[in-house]
Image (cartoon, grey):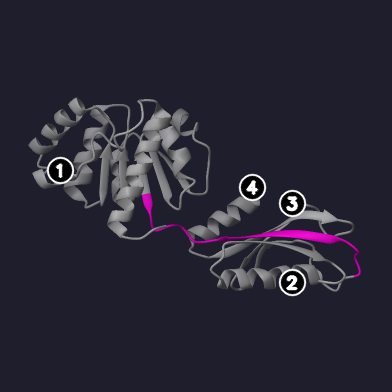
Amino acid sequence: MNEDFLTELAKLKETGVACVVVTLVNVRGSAPQEIGARIIVGSKGLLYGTVGGGKVETKAIAEAFKLLLSESKHLYVDWNLQTDVGMTCGGVVGFYFEKILPLSNWKIAVFGAGHVAQELIRLLVKLDCDITCVDPRNEWLDKIPDHFRLKKIQTNEMKSVLITLAPSTFIASMTMGHAFDQPILLEAMTKFKFPYIGVIGSDSKAKILKEELKKNGVSETLLLELHCPIGESFGNNSPAEIGISIVAQLIKNRDKIYAIRY
């Protein structure tokens, strides 16, 4: 995928535009474009690119319109350019259609970009959610592969990002240590009403952390809702398995809170 295509697609998702990406994936004989050519089609027509123009592109756009209105998300077609499209070319083309929906309602903020966060975010980008990762260390943020679902923020004042987040955001704190987690949690629990807040750590860390938060004004009710240690109780202590357990807990709470399946 070229950079212009990814930029255009991300822009459409951010602005809430549903679209269909049409990619030429197979050619036999003559065709007006090479494999890999793609277009983006929205409800108002062609938004980006070309798969050859003329009749074949017009037919591809019409098929994309149908997909936009259907329950399906994917489609593959083989068209004979003479008999199916009405062109003089004697080739056969295969198009893959993929519906791209706007940004998700499920938003997750991960504070920290260390080993567990690295594994966690690689899993989260596979789900229908939008992720913000916050860390003061650029070198750790850079280790996480870029993705249109992921926004990276480098700042030494991590708690300052909380005010920029949607009220429905799930908060997962896994910073460099207790001294960094505590200010984020205190701010999140006293000034906002996020539906889920979790923090990485041991049972002993959880006890100390909750005592400190209570001394700073966090109610017993809110402390009971704090997920610490974050994640479900399975697996070992490797970053990968901790990441899987956190994803499981996030999904479990997402379904409980929103009472829907994504």
Between the C-alphas of marks 2 and 3, the distance is 18 Å
Q: Position of residue 171 (x, y in %)?
A: 30, 44
Tag 2: residue type? Lys
Q: What residue sits right under mark 3 in the picture?
A: 36
- The magenta region covers 88-107
Q: What residue sits right under mark 1 in the picture?
A: 224
Of pointers 4 and 3, the one earlier in the residue sequence = 4
Up the image or down, 192 lies above or below 54; here it is above
Up the image or down, 71 lies above or below 131; here it is below
Front residue of 77/57: it is 77
| Res 219 seen here | no
Q: Position of residue 160 (x, y in %)?
A: 29, 43
* Secondary structure found at label 2: helix
Residues packed near mark 1 inside 10 Å, few (<14), some (14 to 19) or many (20 plus) = few
Tag 4: residue type? Glu
Up the image or down, 196 lies above or below 212; here it is below
Q: What residue sits right under mark 2 in the picture?
A: 59
Q: Nearest to the eye among marks 3 and 1: give it.
A: 1
Residue depicted at x 9% and y 43%: 220
Q: Quick check: is 96 in the magenta stretch?
A: yes
* Secondary structure found at label 4: helix
Residue depicted at x 32% and y 31%: 175
Q: What residue sits right under mark 4 in the picture?
A: 3
Q: Position of residue 117 (x, y in %)?
A: 40, 34
Tag 3: residue type? Gly
Of pointers 2 and 4, the one earlier in the residue sequence = 4
* Secondary structure found at label 3: loop
* Secondary structure found at label 1: helix
Between the C-alphas of marks 1 and 2, the distance is 57 Å
